[in-house]
Amino acid sequence: MSAKTGLIYVAAALAEIGGCFAFWAWLRLDRPALVLVPGVAALALFAWLLTLAEVDAAGRAFAAYGGVYIVASLVWLVTVEGRAPVGSDLLGAALCLAGAGVILWGGRIG
């Protein structure tokens, strides 16, 4: 993965998590429906950002991005929700990042 694609994936993860959290806040935390406006905008930004990834197929871009999203979600868990990840969270995230790497570089292995 190039540095550019790595940065795109991080930005996409922030946009996706922010957008999804807007819906969470509205439905689970009783925030006003107005929080959905920036949430929907963030989700649109997320989708656009993934089109910029330097990957040869959309499915591969989305699959590899999934590992980054999982790690970013755990960072959100700590920084926004103030909860500590448990060992299985960290192990799962590491496995997902490894899987994302296999997807991105798999064609170059063997």
Image (cartoon, rainbow, N blue to C red):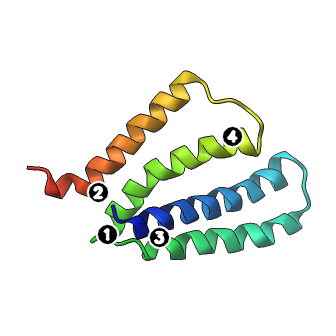
**Mark 2 near mark 1, Cβ–Cβ under 8 Å?**
yes
Q: Identify the residue under disc 3.
A: 50
Q: Residue at 53% across / 76% down in the picture?
A: 48
Q: Alpha-carbon distance for marks 2 and 4?
A: 26 Å
Three-letter code for the amino acid on which mark 3 is drawn: Leu
Mark 4 or 1 closer to N-term?
Answer: 1
Q: Is residue 20 above or below residue 8?
A: above
Three-letter code for the amino acid on which mark 1 is drawn: Val
Classify mark 4: helix, strand or loop: helix
Picture quadrant where residue 57 is located: bottom left
Q: Identify the residue under disc 2.
A: 104
Q: Residues within 10 Å of mark 3 (few under 14, many from 20)?
A: many
Q: Which x, y percent locates residue 4?
A: 42, 70
Q: Which x, y percent locates residue 24?
A: 76, 51
Q: Alpha-carbon distance for marks 1 and 3?
A: 10 Å
Q: Is residue 96 above or below residue 52?
A: above
Q: Identify the residue under disc 4.
A: 77
Mark 3 or 4 closer to N-term?
Answer: 3
**Mark 2 near mark 4, Cβ–Cβ under 8 Å?**
no
**Mark 3 near mark 4, Cβ–Cβ under 8 Å?**
no
Q: Alpha-carbon distance for marks 2 and 3?
A: 14 Å
Three-letter code for the amino acid on which mark 4 is drawn: Leu
Q: Residues within 10 Å of mark 4 (few under 14, many from 20)?
A: some
Q: Is residue 75 above or below residue 31?
A: above
Q: Residues within 10 Å of mark 2 (few under 14, many from 20)?
A: some
Three-letter code for the amino acid on which mark 2 is drawn: Leu
